[in-house]
Image (spheres, rainbow, N blue to C red):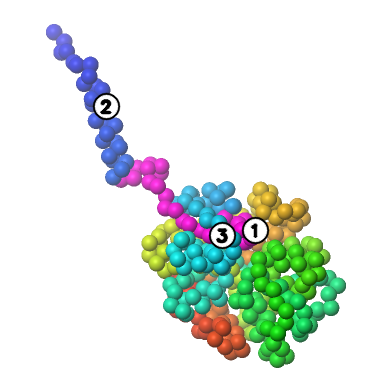
Amino acid sequence: MPELRSPAAPALSCHRLRSGLVILVALFGLGGAAQAQEAMRVAEVVTGNERALLATMAAAGLDTSNGFKLVTRPYGSEEEARQALLKGDVDVIRTDWLWAARQRAGGADIACVAASIAPAAVMVPRNSQITALADLVDRRIGIGHDAGNPTWLMIRAAALSASRLNLDLTARTFGPLPGLAGQLRAGTIDALVADAPEAAMLARQGHVRLIGSDALARGFGVEGQIPTAVWAFRDAGMQRKPTSLSAFFAASRAASHLLASDAKTWIPLARLYPGADTAMLASLRAAHADGEVTHWGALDSARLNDLAKRLAQVLGPEVPAPLPAGLMRDDLTF
């Protein structure tokens, strides 16, 4: 006589099997969806150059493919983003190396990684009578960001060194670059210290470069790449999220390469630059190509330290020199 089996037995067995698989996935992380990716909170300033890069990173899935989840947090100004980093509200901001150096020299655990080496520039109208730094005296100058802008400090130091000219006595306006670029176009300021993307757009509109930050550095005897933008973070953040922070920096370099090399990447980014046509987007792509950081090591950090020391010789304690230890972390070279 055949053995009789309860119809409930197979169902119970399958239930136990499914339960066992769930436990195995929970214990050993089987399957990519089983593990939540760590969030990287990145400040996005409404007028910042990081917007294009972060949008590209998200569109290309460079965050999830590198093992983290990009979370952008909007801020109205770079100063707001800086304060958010200091308070621990974000993990990373884009800023300048001199701000990071001042914070670390003052006791904050701020460190940084090079984000762009695209030279900043002093831009003037094509028919301007300003043809040398000395001509900036008694002119109205716009300076992107704030008085700590490294390019502005190099301009001041160069004017003091060469001609004993104190450009702090000129009429200066600080603030977000898009607004200042509008003032330059309108003629309410005579010159603008601009980041590379804004300088590229102004060049397309008929303005010319008076001098670039690369030439200013060479004037102080410093040759080679100098970061015009950095990703700043806290040592405490690196302790909490070492893998995700390193992955973010790798993803940012991948996004930077896309911006530098792929014209199609710029098509959806046109919304960030009202009125930009195909030629303008091509100029922006060229500016990003100039800024792509393909390597950063001990020699590069030493070069930046050399520049800081030479600026400090002219400007004094405005520039912390030598740069504080750990500003450019040895474990994040590439």
* Residue 217 in view (yes/no): no
Q: Residue furthest left?
A: 1
Q: Which element type, helix, strand or loop, lies under badge 2?
A: helix
Q: Amino acid at mark 3?
A: Tyr
Question: Residue 34 placed where, x, y %?
Answer: 37, 43
- Which of the two discs, 3 and 2, sits closer to the camera? 3
Q: Which element type, helix, strand or loop, lies under badge 3?
A: strand
Q: Amino acid at mark 2?
A: Cys
Per the model, the C-alpha gap separating discs 3 and 1 is: 26 Å
Is there a contact, CB below 8 Å, between mark 3 and mark 2? no
In the drawing, does residue 289 fall left or right of residue 37? Answer: right
Quadrant into which the N terminus falls: top left
Residue carrying label 2: 14
Question: Residue 140 placed where, x, y %?
Answer: 75, 77
Q: Which numbered disc, 1 or 2, marks the residue that appears first in the sequence?
A: 2
Q: Which mark is residue 75?
A: 3
State yes or no: residue 77 in magenta: no
Q: Which numbered disc, 3 or 2, marks the residue that appears first in the sequence?
A: 2
Read off the magenta span: 28-54
Q: Residue furthest top?
A: 1
Using a 10 Å C-alpha cutoff, classify the residue at mark 3 as few (fewer than 14 neighbours), some (14 to 19) or many (20 or more): some
Q: Which element type, helix, strand or loop, lies under badge 1?
A: helix
Is there a contact, CB below 8 Å, between mark 3 and mark 1? no
Q: Amino acid at mark 1?
A: Ala
Question: Residue 112 placed where, x, y %?
Answer: 50, 69
Residue carrying label 1: 260
State yes or no: residue 53 in magenta: yes
In the drawing, does residue 168 fall left or right of residue 22? Answer: right
Residue in the image at 69% along x and 69% along y: 194
As drawn, 34 above or below 259:
above
